[in-house]
Amino acid sequence: MGQFAVFGESTKMSVFEINPKSNFDIFPNPTSDYLVIKNTTAFTEPVNIDIYNSLGKLMGSYRLMGINPSLSVKDLIAGNYIIKFYNNSVQYTQSFVKM
């Protein structure tokens, strides 16, 4: 016999939980070429950035440098992506659309 599972309201079905509050803003969203990253907090250590596709595959890893840097997404195919910012003191994820 097959198995049957019931999931409750608190069951997480995604790879990442999108955080409602952030130290980062990304724009434009949707985008076709570049994402501009606005960092609203000065961190004492570098911030790493990972981009994942909608299947959870890592598409690229970067390091946040400077004030309001831009990140090229020209090589990504059109679709939905998750961008993850993290270091020892922060972890934040946000979605964006590549056109």
Image (cartoon, rainbow, N blue to C red):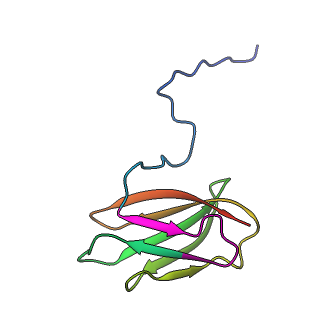
Q: How many marks?
A: 0
Image quarter of the N terminus: top right
Identified at 75% across, 17% down, the residue is 2
Q: Residue furthest left?
A: 44
What is the x, y in percent for residue 8?
52, 21
What is the x, y in percent for residue 5?
63, 19
When the figure is inspected, residue 17 is found, relative to residue 53, above or below; the finding is: above
Quarter residue 43 falls in: bottom left
Observer-nearest of 34 and 50: 34
Please state if 5 lies on the left or on the right of 23 as rendered. right
Observer-nearest of 71 and 26: 26
Identified at 55% across, 47% down, the residue is 15
Identified at 37% across, 83% down, the residue is 67
Observer-nearest of 60 and 92: 92
Image quarter of the C terminus: bottom right
Residue 33 within the magenta-colored segment of the rendering: yes
Residue 53 within the magenta-colored segment of the rendering: no
- The stretch of residues the image draws in magenta is 23-35
Identified at 45% across, 66% down, the residue is 25
Observer-nearest of 89 and 26: 26
When the figure is inspected, residue 8 is found, relative to residue 41, above or below; the finding is: above
Quarter residue 52 falls in: bottom right
What is the x, y in percent for residue 96?
60, 61
When the figure is inspected, residue 57 is found, relative to residue 4, above or below; the finding is: below
Please state if 28 lies on the left or on the right of 98 as rendered. left
Quarter residue 41 falls in: bottom left
Q: Residue furthest top?
A: 1
